Image: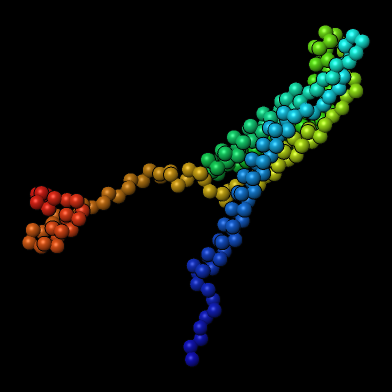
Amino acid sequence: MECVSAVPAPQTRARAATAPDSAGSRRSLAAALLLGAAGSTVVLLASGQTWAGGEAAVGGGTLPLTADGQDITGLPAALAVVALAALVAVFAVRGGSRALVAGLLALSGLGAGLSSALGASDSAALDEKAAQTTGNTSATIDALTHTAWPYVTAVGGLLILLAGLLALRYGSRWPTMSGRYERDGTPRPRKAAPPAPDPDRPEDLWKALDRGEDPTREA
């Protein structure tokens, strides 16, 4: 009675070993794309909202003033644009260049988050508006209030940071966008021309006609 071995074939073991890794790479790729795109969108939208408000004394009354994120600091929006460009570029490069672009993506998110958090309590932009409105360079804003939009912007920066960290950790396993279209410079072998049909063999003549050739043409 023959004994059948239960050891899987080498090809089966190889497929089993690479399948989880491939699935993990796809998940990390999808997560990085989602986090990077969502984070950049949040930063761009939230930085255009009102971050702070107050009142400036004008004559015998007061004038309400507001400042959006762009008035307080334009850094988060600028870094969000950089992050979007890096998110696209990370798939167009490979090797060490991919790690550099992934690092730029992570730093863009970190910078956007930190600058947003620092701008959450800023009053300089409103003081400047008060001075311009009243014509008094020493005028300051009163009844200063802040909204939650700076913190929403900071959350967007955090999402971009996470996308960059994923790219740094798993980017070496991701496919390259232009990889399938690149040529390695190796000359492509030319197909050999089909043999000339034999006039004494009718089947050769029919095959030549099927290929669109003229069987009566001399080689």
Q: Position of residue 166 (x, y in %)?
A: 66, 47
Residue at 70 percent across and 44 percent down: it is: 162
Q: Position of residue 106 (x, y in %)?
A: 68, 39
Q: Position of residue 181 (x, y in %)?
A: 43, 44
Task: Answer with left or right where residue 191 lies relative to residue 137.
Answer: left
Which of the 4 quarters of the picture holds residue 61? top right
Q: Position of residue 32 (x, y in %)?
A: 64, 46
Residue at 53 percent across and 40 percent down: it is: 92
Q: Nearer the viewer, residue 187 or 213?
A: 213
Q: Is residue 191 above or below residue 101?
A: below
Task: Answer with left or right where residue 4 lies relative to residue 47.
Answer: left
Q: Nearer the viewer, residue 80 or 66?
A: 66
User: How is the model colour-coded?
Assistant: rainbow
Tell me, yes or no, if residue 163 can be seen here. Answer: no
Which of the 4 quarters of the picture holds residue 139? top right
Tell me, yes or no, if residue 174 can be seen here. Answer: yes
Residue at 51 percent across and 69 percent down: it is: 12
| Residue placed furthest toward the bottom | 1
Task: Answer with left or right where residue 139 lies relative to residue 165.
Answer: right
Q: How many marks?
A: 0
Q: Nearer the viewer, residue 199 or 47?
A: 47
| Residue placed furthest toward the right | 60
Residue at 18 percent across and 58 percent down: it is: 207
Task: Answer with left or right where residue 20 lies relative to residue 140.
Answer: left
| Residue placed furthest toward the left | 200
